[in-house]
Image: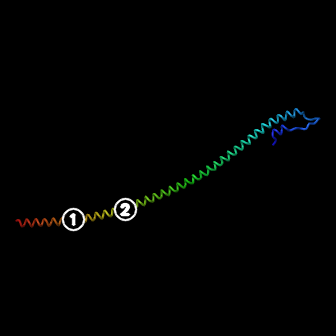
Amino acid sequence: MLTPLDIENKKFSKQMMNGYSVEEVDEFLDDLTVDYEKAYKQSSELKTRVEELEKSLLHYKTIEDTLQNTLMMAQSTAEEVKEVARQQAEQIIKEAEGNARKSVDDLGQEILIKKKELEDIKQQFEVYKAKMESLLISQLELIKDINKEAN
């Protein structure tokens, strides 16, 4: 690509006959140089801007990739946490059910023991009642005998 300096320094050979007007060519080249210099500067600025934008785009693509990876890891971690929580919940439920069954079994055993104790107490009461009845009968007989002797 030609630079504005190349255009400005361009010299044409001059012909004696039927050539272009040197002043018109120089004036046109001066105008062309000014316009071309503006276009060249603008092109250079745009190239710089494009490079900056490409760098920014690369930076943001890197950030996007990082965010996507982070999101995928977060989703994976969330799934793992949910699975662990579900397993822990199942374990807690199993333990609670086991504890409940053990408590029911223990209460059943305690009820049987208490029933046996109640039966033993009833039996002891019956024995005690029979002994008291026997004692009262023997005391009554004794009182009758004393009354017979006293009369």
Amino acid carrying mark 2 in the image: Asp
Q: Quadrant of the N terminus?
A: top right
The answer to whether residue 8 is left or right of residue 129 is: right
**In this rendering, position of residue 33 left or right of residue 64:** right
- The x and y percentages for residue 49 are 71, 41
Spot occupied by residue 134 in the image (x, y as percentages of width and height): 17, 67
Tell which residue pokes out farthest to the right in this image. 17
Image quadrant of residue 2?
A: top right
Residue 56: image x %, image y %?
67, 45
Query: Which residue: 27% across, 65% down?
Result: 120
Question: Does 16 sit left or right of 7 as displayed?
Answer: right
Give residue 113's quadrant in the image: bottom left
The label shown at residue 128 is 1
What SS does tag 2 mark?
Answer: helix
**Mark 1 residue element:** helix
Which residue sits furthest left? 151
Q: Which mark is residue 66?
A: none
Which residue: 83% across, 34% down? Answer: 30
The type of colouring in the image is rainbow
Name the side, left or right, on which 104 lies relative to 24: left
> Mark number for residue 106?
2
Corner quadrant of residue 128: bottom left
Residue at horizontal 81 percent and vertical 40 percent from the top: 3
Depth check: 100 or 2 in front? Answer: 2
Gap between marks 1 and 2, in whole Å? 32 Å
Work out whether mark 1 precedes mark 2 in sequence or the reverse, and give the earlier one: 2
Q: Residues within 10 Å of mark 1 (few under 14, many from 20)?
A: few
- Exactly how many numbered labels are in the figure? 2
Q: For label 2, count other residues whose C-alpha is less than 10 Å away and answer few (under 14), some (14-19) or many (20+).
A: few
Q: Position of residue 99 (x, y in %)?
A: 41, 60
Q: Amino acid at mark 1?
A: Tyr
